[in-house]
């Protein structure tokens, strides 16, 4: 059976050029970037070149980029780092959103339960957006951090992070955004958004797994995240993964070259898919992924249980058996057999949310992949007669 992969929001295939860029650092250029000999110097040069590349892509300076092992680690780095800086200072309140990725929600719950920080989770509108005014109204005298994702990993909806930033400019509050899904799909620029920290993950942009970055605005008071070494300007101990850094660098360079082409391709596939689904299911289909204020590569759908007969617990399994890889939400919470907290927060009942399908396109998908998905879906969720 030939499989069709439509789960690129979970992870992407590594680009062949990325793999080629990594190989020398897995073979002959295997030095430790902290070593003073020629092997170490070669690794160090690559490390700093990659830092420059990532920084330039998002409008940052090189000293504001820290390499980590994952987007989850980057979120932990920023949020815990700021929280521990303010520990016992009287500033102990954080504002976030109830539809954040688990990397943010679980981190905030940890701080609340173990260190007695106070966290306010703002609910989204029925359309799935976090309103800047709601964030502003939740701020207190002891608030030191706002954390709102740039785009939602399940619905693809884009939040007005710049609007949030504008509303808290007169406050002594830091703004963090989980931007993992936005990189390569939006014109993401840290200066334009006026944020203090942001996360980037290589495996969402055709790079390798196990390498990511944290943008940390200069002079943001963050405690050291990983102890045991002086790496990453004494902020994250541990020998750098140079081969993966090389792959990350190449993935960013390919984004620079392909951004307009990629986003046009994603939009074309999105329009093709939504058009076919609307023509088949009409008002029986629910689109959870919005319109123009959403990422071009994500379509999230549910079905009206009052109009269609379907087994919400088997949709994804049956699609997989037909050779279609999609998801029902975040890969980080897959296997729990629970409805998406994002979709229940925007008002879907548990059964409808459990039967949701997230289709996410990649650089290599075609209209033929969409046709195969739609045909397979039609055999599982039968259109109205």
Image (spheres, rainbow, N blue to C red):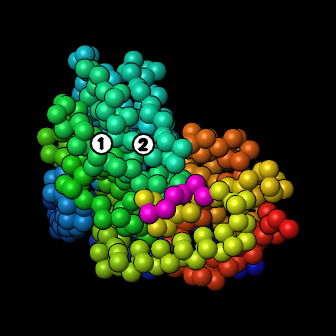
The numbered mark at residue 224 is: none
Q: Split into 4 quadrants, where in the image is the C terminus?
A: bottom right
Q: Nearer the viewer, residue 85 or 376?
A: 376
Q: Residue 134 at what x, y percent from top left?
A: 38, 34
Q: Is residue 7 left or right of residue 152?
A: right
Q: Which residues are magenta?
A: 287-292
Q: Split into 4 quadrants, where in the image is the N terminus?
A: bottom right
Q: How many marks?
A: 2
Task: Residue 81: name its quadrant.
Answer: top left
Q: Is residue 330 left or right of residue 321?
A: left
Camera sees residue 233:
yes
Q: Residue 69 at what x, y percent from top left?
A: 39, 52
Q: CA distance from mark 1 to mark 2?
A: 9 Å
For the residue carrying disc 2, how many other residues have a C-alpha within 10 Å: few (<14), some (14-19), or many (20+)? many
Q: Nearer the viewer, residue 307 or 39?
A: 307
Who comes first in sequence, dot 1 or dot 2? 2
Q: Residue 360 at what x, y percent from top left?
A: 55, 65
Instruction: Kindly check if marks 1 and 2 are in contact, taking CB atoms under 8 A apart as contact.
Output: yes
Tell me which residue sits at (34%, 29%) in the image.
137
The residue singled out by tag 2 in the image is 130
For the residue carrying disc 1, how many other residues have a C-alpha within 10 Å: few (<14), some (14-19), or many (20+)? many
Q: Main secondary structure of the magenta part?
A: loop
């Amino acid at each position: 059976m030939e499989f069709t992969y439509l789960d690129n929001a979970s992870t992407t295939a590594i680009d062949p050029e990325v793999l080629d860029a990594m190989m020398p650092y897995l073979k002959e250029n295997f030095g430790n970037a902290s070593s003073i000999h020629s092997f170490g110097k070669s690794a160090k040069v690559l490390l700093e070149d990659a830092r420059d590349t990532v920084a330039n892509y998002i409008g940052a300076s090189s000293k504001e980029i820290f390499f980590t092992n994952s987007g989850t680690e980057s979120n932990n780095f920023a949020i815990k780092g700021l929280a521990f800086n303010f520990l016992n200072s009287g500033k102990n309140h954080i504002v976030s959103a109830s539809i954040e990725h688990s990397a943010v929600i679980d981190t905030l719950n940890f701080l609340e339960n173990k260190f007695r920080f106070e966290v306010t989770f703002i609910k989204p509108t029925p359309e799935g957006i976090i309103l800047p005014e709601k964030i502003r109204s939740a701020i207190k005298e002891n608030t030191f951090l706002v954390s709102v994702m740039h785009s939602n990993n399940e619905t693809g909806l884009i939040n007005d992070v710049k609007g949030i930033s504008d509303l808290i400019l007169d406050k002594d509050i830091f703004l963090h955004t989980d931007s993992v899904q936005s990189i390569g799909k939006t014109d993401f620029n840290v200066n334009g958004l006026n944020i203090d920290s942001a996360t980037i993950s290589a495996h969402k942009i055709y790079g390798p797994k196990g390498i990511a970055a944290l943008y940390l605005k200069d002079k943001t008071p963050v405690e050291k995240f990983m102890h045991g070494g002086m790496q990453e300007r004494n902020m994250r101990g541990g020998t750098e993964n140079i081969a993966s850094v090389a792959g990350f660098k190449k993935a960013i360079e390919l984004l620079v070259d392909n951004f307009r082409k990629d986003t046009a391709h994603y939009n074309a596939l999105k329009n093709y898919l939504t058009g076919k689904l609307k023509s088949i299911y009409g008002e029986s289909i629910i689109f959870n992924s919005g319109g123009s204020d959403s990422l071009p590569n994500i379509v999230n759908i549910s079905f009206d249980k009052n109009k269609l007969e379907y087994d919400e617990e088997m949709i994804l399994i049956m699609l997989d058996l037909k050779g279609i890889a999609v998801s029902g939400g975040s890969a980080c919470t897959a296997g729990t057999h629970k409805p998406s907290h994002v979709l229940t927060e925007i008002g879907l009942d548990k059964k409808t949310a459990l039967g949701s399908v997230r289709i996410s396109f990649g650089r290599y998908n075609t209209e033929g992949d969409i046709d195969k998905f739609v045909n397979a879906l039609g055999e599982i969720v039968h259109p109205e007669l």
